[in-house]
Amino acid sequence: MAHIVIIGGGFAGLDAARALARSAAQVTLIDRRNHHVFQPLLYQVATAGLSPGDIASPIRWILRRQRNLRVLLGDVQRIEPAEKRVILDGGDIVTYDALILAAGLTHSYFGHEDWAARAPGLKTLDDALEMRRRVLMAFEEAEREVDPDRQRRLLTFAIIGGGPTGVELAGALAEIARKGLRSEFDQVDPASARIVLIEGGPTILSTFPESLRAAARRSLKRLGVEVHEGTRVTDIDEQGVQAGDTRVEAATVLWAAGVRAIDLGSCFPGQLERDGRVKVRPDLSVEGFPEVFVAGDMASFTHQTGKPLPGVAQAAKQLGTHAARNADRRLRGDATQPFRYRDPGNLATIGRNSAIADFGFFRLSGYAGWLFWLFLHIAFLIGFRNRLSVMLQWATSYVTYQRSVRLITGEATAARSVTDDPGRPLDRPTSS
Amino acid sequence: MAHIVIIGGGFAGLDAARALARSAAQVTLIDRRNHHVFQPLLYQVATAGLSPGDIASPIRWILRRQRNLRVLLGDVQRIEPAEKRVILDGGDIVTYDALILAAGLTHSYFGHEDWAARAPGLKTLDDALEMRRRVLMAFEEAEREVDPDRQRRLLTFAIIGGGPTGVELAGALAEIARKGLRSEFDQVDPASARIVLIEGGPTILSTFPESLRAAARRSLKRLGVEVHEGTRVTDIDEQGVQAGDTRVEAATVLWAAGVRAIDLGSCFPGQLERDGRVKVRPDLSVEGFPEVFVAGDMASFTHQTGKPLPGVAQAAKQLGTHAARNADRRLRGDATQPFRYRDPGNLATIGRNSAIADFGFFRLSGYAGWLFWLFLHIAFLIGFRNRLSVMLQWATSYVTYQRSVRLITGEATAARSVTDDPGRPLDRPTSS
């Protein structure tokens, strides 16, 4: 029996698997995590609005009814396309008749890999929990800090990258600081936190039309987010961010700027883009390897418009489905079909009550855009329970301004010390 | 103004803080985590039934309305009772007029601290997430394993300690294996998992009457849990557990046996029990330090019955409230009062539909006990949102047998390899 292997359980891999539900082939889906993540809401976990369980489900569970499918938890080390096989951690070998490569993206620091420790990115649940930990710890450390300069630095958050993720993070952070933490601290006023969004390109949200960008800038301004456009980061150090002449003293730096493909494309050396994505032919296969298809953010597909596809869930899903159908066609001896992207539109949210949506024939901003965003995201969340739980959490936090999952986990003990003058007394009078 | 310092934000510390809401003193509560955990449900997080956010809330948020209170995130390094001060991480100093010590317990391996890595205990959210990761990874690794002996070992779970936590863990694990994971795996049958509960003392649930213990044993048997009583663990190695002549080959070992007090009592050397708890006088103060009170599981209080108090939430809460009132009395120049424990009863649950409850004047077991347990635990959960969310999750998982939070997080990549024969092919036929 023919064997189709899918690498990756993101939007592309999952839809590829689903598209093969009635295939005569056996299907194996390999992912290095046991869960699928609803990426568009990852920033909500990073800002303590939702629990990991609300936006993630086990891949096994999602695909449990598909009888021709096997799910393997494994970390693919490399692909050997000449031998048509995949090598996992521990050396285990999986051979294939057709391969769908959809391993997705990771952070890229444009050659400054040393920035990674200071400015974590947001691709996985663990990334999101690390961001949450850093954000919440900054407020806690500020509360214990006696030096005003250091306190100021602890209450400054720099977000690098003004795409949808950066804008959504900035908006959510501004809200948690201005509203969610108010009245819980004694020595600091969280509402005074400084949130700085730094974009290296000429404009934030570059994939949106200017009218919607202007609406987004107004929303960010209302939330008190400082926006720097055309400001390229040149250094990130222990104290803050240098962007040309602009200096931002910030204890917490979040990375939403660069991405590159997971390092598996190197098995197809002639077909690599500079960012690690793999060039595909019109039918999504790789030049020289007609049984290998690439889908999701890993695919560099430019045949339709001469430009790359947008890095959104809808594109990944369409690519996954199409790659799977072509793989199946090929194994049956049929001709593969060229891919056509149908653009469903573009969305970003900026805190409560404000979002922008661009669907070509109609555009929304402000409250209407936000309601639309809310509806779409809940509708597409995987699993009925998740949908209910997310609605419940959002309803509560909408009414109360509370971020409900403000838990600092992931380190056995609490505070990295921020002081270099041990022995200082913390016995300041309590305000009452 | 007088200053009362509380160390610990568990049941005792939280109730101590609340009891001081109308005190004229200033109050500082110090915890090394930012959240209070509803400990009786921690095993539900460890077995993927609930999210961390369902059973934990930020201490700041819980106490946000208390105006005379300051919350500090800090790791207390030591107490200097002669100087009436507390030293935090980083060397920060907090002085007090009265101290309430309620830092709680940690795991104890009876001198075998090397067992800790192989057999994690369950006291914090991070502990619970680590248990969850190990349990879920064991099934994933079994699915990839080709050697039948190793597969068997991966599907064997040893739980050491037959108190309420051990019994609850064993019951929940049996359920997830028998029902929750069924039909999602291809090479292994999760329902065939072996769950072994090992108790060193003569009986499980030693604080319950024998009739209820018998009911619990029947429930465990029905769930297919092997119970070994009077079987003391003598070694834990990479492959399993040795308990006298009994050998259990188990990849996953969970520790629910020994506890000892957090190591702060050593600042009161004459008053230490062997397990690190601090002997208290009838008014909960420490001999020689009338301004220091001990509450919660750290307090060794034997004045009422000659025996220690049970390590349950109700005892901790009563101790916390009483210690706080006595601290306040003392600072006002009033006489302190002796503590009297009012026993509210004893509860444990064994999977779905079965629990035992002992309230002296009435005893429940089976389904009635379980409904009662459900009601009490939801009623006492902190925060309205948590209560709703927990009810929702439980209702769903009751109907569907699904454990909803089966996420493996906390490690960047997936599988530690379980094979020592790299290069083996994983291309077994898929059952269909």
Image (cartoon, coloured by chain):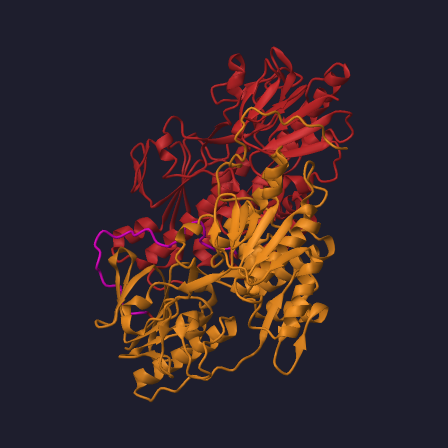
Chain colours: A red, B orange
Which image quadrant for residue B50? Answer: bottom right
Q: Eyeballing the image, is B165 above or below A329? A: below
Residue with the most extreme front position: B245
From the viewer's perspective, tell me whether residue A88 is left or right of residue A6.
left
| Residue A422 falls within the magenta-colored stretch | yes
> Who's the residue at 68% across and 20% down the image?
A339
**Can you give x and y, in whole percent of width and height, for residue B158 in the image?**
56, 52
Horizontal arrangement in the rendering, residue A33 relative to residue A198 (left or right):
right
Instruction: Please tell me whether residue A113 belongs to the stretch shown in magenta.
Output: no
Task: Measuring from the top left, give residue A176's x and y in whole percent.
Answer: 46, 54
> Residue at (25%, 55%) from the top-left corner?
A147
Question: Which residue is outermost to the bottom?
Answer: B335
Q: Position of residue B107 (x, y in %)?
A: 44, 59
Majority secondary structure in the magenta region? loop
Q: Which of B313 and A311 is in front in this view?
A: B313
**Residue A224 visible here:** no
Q: How many labels sit on residues?
A: 0
Q: Which residue lies furthest to the top in this view?
A: A288
Q: In this view, does B304 lie above or below A49?
A: below
Quadrant position of the N terminus of chain B in the picture = bottom left
Q: What stretch is highlighted in magenta?
A: A405-430
> Where is the C terminus of chain B found, in terms of image quarters?
top right
Q: Is residue B4 above or below residue A114?
A: below
**Viewer-nearest residue: B201 or B284:** B201
Q: Residue at x 77, y 26 (%)?
A: A23
Q: Where is residue B5 in the image (x, y as percent from the top left)?
A: 33, 71
Is residue A141 in view from this perspective?
yes
